[in-house]
Each structure stands twice: as C-alpha cells, then as structure tokens.
Image (cartoon, grey):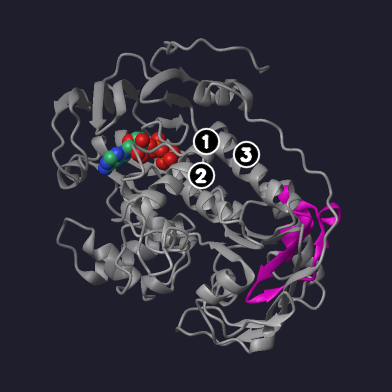
Amino acid sequence: MTATPLPDAPSSLPPADGDAPARLQLRGITKRYPGIVANDGIDLRVGRGQIHAILGENGAGKSTLMKIIYGAVAPDAGEVLFDGRPVHIRNPQQARQLGIAMVFQHFNLFETLTVAENIWLGQEWTMSREMLRVNLDEAGKLFGLDIDLERPVHTLSVGERQKVEILRSLVTHPKLLILDEPTSVLTPQAVQSLFAMLRRLAQSGCSILYISHKLHEIRSLCDRCTVIRQGKVTGVVDPREHSDASLARLMIGAEPPALQNRPGTPGELVLQVEGLSLPCDNLFGTALDRLHLQVRAGEVVGIAGISGNGQNELLRALSGEDTRAAPDAVRLFGQPAGRSDPRQRRRQWGLHFVPEERLGRATVPSMDLAQNLLLTRDLAIGRLGWLSRRRLHAKAAEVVQRFRVKAAGTHSAARSLSGGNLQKYIVGREMDAGPRLLILAQPTWGVDVGAASQIRAQILALREQGCAVLVISEELDELFEVCDRLYVMAKGTLSPSLQRAEASIEKIGLWMSGLWEGGPQQPTAAGQAELATMV
Ligand SMILES: Nc1ncnc2c1ncn2[C@@H]1O[C@H](COP(=O)(O)OP(=O)(O)OP(=O)(O)O)[C@@H](O)[C@H]1O
C-alpha cells in the first residue's frame, strides 16, 4: 500500500473476533509519573488468539501499559476486563493466576543461579524439579529455544538470556503472553523460529501482545496494531495494510530521514588487534583465537555475528575490562594497550565504549542521569577533587537535549527511563565526550525508528570528524547502513575484513556460521548449498 497521510484520531477497525468477549479489554487507562503522563486514557481490545502489536516511539508509554496489564504497576484511572470480566490486577502473581505471562525488555534473572534454577524460581505451582526439567526440554525443543539448563546465567550472552526469559513464560501455558521487544538480540533464524512458535501458540487460542520497534516484524507477525504516541492511542490498524512510512508517521508524526553515507578517507591506524588470543575466564565463555582487526581514523568498521560467539570477550579486551591480553595484542595509536584499564584507555587514547547492557554495566540503575555521567566522564570534577553538581547537571541536560532523551529531568534515576531513552542517553554521553575511538555494542537495541536513524547519523558525523568507530551489531541492515568495512565473528574467531561494497547478506550469513576460507568451520558442498538457502 502506498503511504497516505493518516488521521491523528484512532481508526475504528471492527473486532476481528466479532461479538465474542475479548481476551483483554482496557478502557481509559491513565498513569502519571512526576512530570509525565505515561498513559493518557488508553483503550485497547485484544481478541482471543490474536497477535496484537503495540507500536510507539521511545517513551510513548508501551512498557508502562504492559506493566499495568501484568499488575506490576497500578493505574491511576481506567478499567481492565479479562475474558469479559472486570478485574483488578494488583500484582504479577494475580496476573499469572489469570493466565497472563510477560517477558520484560530488561531481564529479571539471578546472575549466579543456573537457567533451570531461574525458571524454577519464577513458577507458582508445586512441580518437581525433574518434571520442570522435562517440560523445559520439551518447550525448548518445540520452540527452537535450545539452551543448556545447567549454565549459570552470568555466563550467558544477552540473546541467550532472552531465550531463558521466553522459555520461563512458555512453561506456564499462558492465555495472554506479553512480549516486550523479544527479538532485539535474536539471530534472524531464531526470530523465524520464535515467530513460528508464536503463530502456533496463537492458533491454540493464546493471545499475544507484542511490542517491537521493528516494523517488518510487526507486519509479518501481527494481525492488529495499536499505535501510541505521547501516552495516547493514535491508531488501530491492520499492519499488513500499511507501509513503513505510514506506520512511522502514526508513531512519530514523521518519516525518519534517509541516511547519507558518503565513503570517507580513512586516516591513521587507531586500533590494531594483532593475534589476540584469550582463554575463557569462565566455564561457558568463548575463547578468543588469534584475532586480527584494524580500525582507522575516519572509518566505521562493523563486526557482524550471532551474539555469544566471542563478541563479549572481545569487547572486554578492547575496553580494558579484561586486561589479560599481551600488551602488544591490542595497540591504540601504535602503542601497546593490552594491559591498560578502561580509565587509562579513555584518558590516554580517548577510547569510549557503549556496552550492550544498559542497566548495571552502562549505568547504575538507582543513580540519576547526572550522576551516571561520572561513570565515564570527569568533566565536573575540579582540580582538588571537588564535584560541581551544577556543571554535572548542566552537561547531563545538554546530552538530554542534544540526543532528544525523553526524561522528567536530569534528576531522574536511570532505571526510570524507558529502554530506548536510556540507550539514547548512554550513546549520547559517550559521543558527547569527543571520543577518538568509539566502540558500540548493539547501539540501537530497543530504540525507535526515528531515534535509531538519529544514532546512525551521529555515528557517521563522528566519522566525518575523524573518529574511529567500531560497531558490533546483530543487525545486518544497520551494519550495511553505517559501515565502511565489515568483519564477521564466529566461534571466537574473526573473518578477514570485507569492504561494504563486497559484502552481501548471503555472504555474511555464511560467514556467521564460520564458513570463510580458513575459518573455524569448513563447508561441505551439501552444507554450503543448504546454508545458502537459509540466508
Ligand atoms: N518508574 C517510573 N518513574 C518515573 N517515570 C517513569 C517510570 N516508568 C516510566 N516512566 C516514564 O514514563 C514514560 C513512558 O515510559 P515507558 O517505559 O512506558 O515507554 P516505552 O513506550 O515503553 O518506551 P521504550 O520504547 O523506550 O521502551 C517515559 O517518559 C518514562 O520516563
């Protein structure tokens, strides 16, 4: 369908399931936080077996609405009906008793416990651990969510943790499953098996509320879509009948600007990784095996690959969180840096870093936005060690404004920000520091289409200013959009580098399985043909 201007008022699509009582109906849901109306009189109807998308820009109020349905947040006003009956869902336990399960955007897992123990702790009923294990094995296999139940959670990649969260809700056989951006860190193949599983689940009568910023996913999976902007419903549409442009207009009031990526001229060698090998420092990590990597000034280099193939270990060695590397294995501006800590790398060579975990690693959740600046910036600390709060808040306010972060103020705790807004703040904090080398892991994870295009434009602007940028991402489209060169990571090794013009989705897809010449996996003729049809 061509993009036509859409009215601001909600459209009135008839319910897909006729007069049958809806699985879930919301009337006039309102929730206020200091300085912000997160939900402003929201109406929503989800039919039985319907896969219903909730779409909206960062901070639009989607997660708040889902938390209200799940009983984790109490609304200030409004009514909730479940299977036609009015209900007051006071807490998540009550929601689960009704048959509502939720997979949150931020993981709720105990780091030191195993996968099985984490899932066990989330269950209400008295089921033996052995039974739970059998159920989990079955659910994991049925839905393609294979994962070792004995692994401690702290050893899992973000993608693997997300699988645990999904598995945990599936074993409860829910009537309504809420998924808040479940595919942000899943591979394309894992997304396809998740969708197949969700379709099967919907056919069995389970309704699904699906939050995502990925418009093509919503179009391929969902039969209804409610769009929210600034806490209000702006439309209820059939997403299959809408273009990206028309959905983006409903969501952010405009289409995101197209990126201008002109090839640059790379300058001096900024980061050089030479034969970096590191053994695992935990039982389930990935050992790094003779990595070679170069990033020059004025160049954006990407690392594609399925998370859990050594990206985390490489990032830790590059950022200085892991200083076990030989000094010469990581060189910054030609100098040995393998044993330097993050502070040294930041001060001496201008290395800034955006990790993929927003809460806990990139920010301290309970600290406010201004205080969180101090984690990587010492601009507000005077010569005698005094801290200027005024300067700190002024700088935080500048980042908030420049990167259009939606927050009540610089005194807001990091954890009170919506996921996408916190990501914009973290990326903004590091970009604003004037880095000479910026390393970003999953830079647009959970970020809406408008903000994602803003972050990518800022990456290109940094490159124009001569900054060397390394982007680690599972989103191939993103890498193709911003990178000059690409590597692929598989099984702790790195592929040779490819100019963007030489890279195709098919080739990168094969390389993601380690299938490059001399890579960790050598293709058989039959295997290569099969893989080629998968990508
Ligand atoms: N506990 C809280 N305290 C204060 N403000 C909050 C709290 N939770 C949410 N908010 C605010 O309410 C607004 C809506 O947040 P919400 O997380 O619902 O947005 P969202 O649409 O899910 O965004 P995203 O796509 O970025 O996840 C935001 O401005 C957020 O800062």
* N-term mark: 3 or 1: 1
| Residue in view at x 37 percent, y 34 percent | 62
Mark 3 and mark 1 residues within 8 Å of each other at the beta carbon: no
| Residue in view at x 41 percent, y 12 percent | 14
Closer to the camera, 388 or 129? 388
- The relative height of residue 350 versus residue 313 in the rendered view (above or below) is above
Q: Quadrant of the N terminus?
A: top right
Q: Kindly identify which residue carries mark 1.
A: 221
Closer to the camera, 329 or 446? 329
- The relative height of residue 456 versus residue 128 in the rendered view (above or below) is above
Closer to the camera, 146 or 86? 86
Q: Quadrant of residue 282?
A: bottom left
Q: Is mark 2 within 8 Å of ligand 1?
A: no
Marking on residue 195: 2
**Looking at the picture, how far across and down is residue 470, in whole percent?**
67, 61
Q: Kindly identify which residue carries mark 3.
A: 453
How many circles with numbers are drawn on the protein? Answer: 3
Q: Amino acid at mark 1?
A: Leu
**Looking at the picture, how far across and down is residue 236, in whole percent?**
44, 19
Crowd tier of the residue under label 2, counting other residues whose Cα lies within 10 Å: few below 14, some 14–19, many 20 or above = some
* N-term mark: 1 or 2: 2
**Looking at the picture, how far across and down is residue 314, in whole percent?**
59, 74
Q: Quadrant of residue 490?
A: bottom right
Q: Is residue 168 left or right of residue 185?
A: left
For the residues carrying marks 3 and 1, which lies nearer the camera in this image? 3
Q: Is residue 325 left or right of residue 161?
A: right
Crowd tier of the residue under label 3, counting other residues whose Cα lies within 10 Å: few below 14, some 14–19, many 20 or above = some
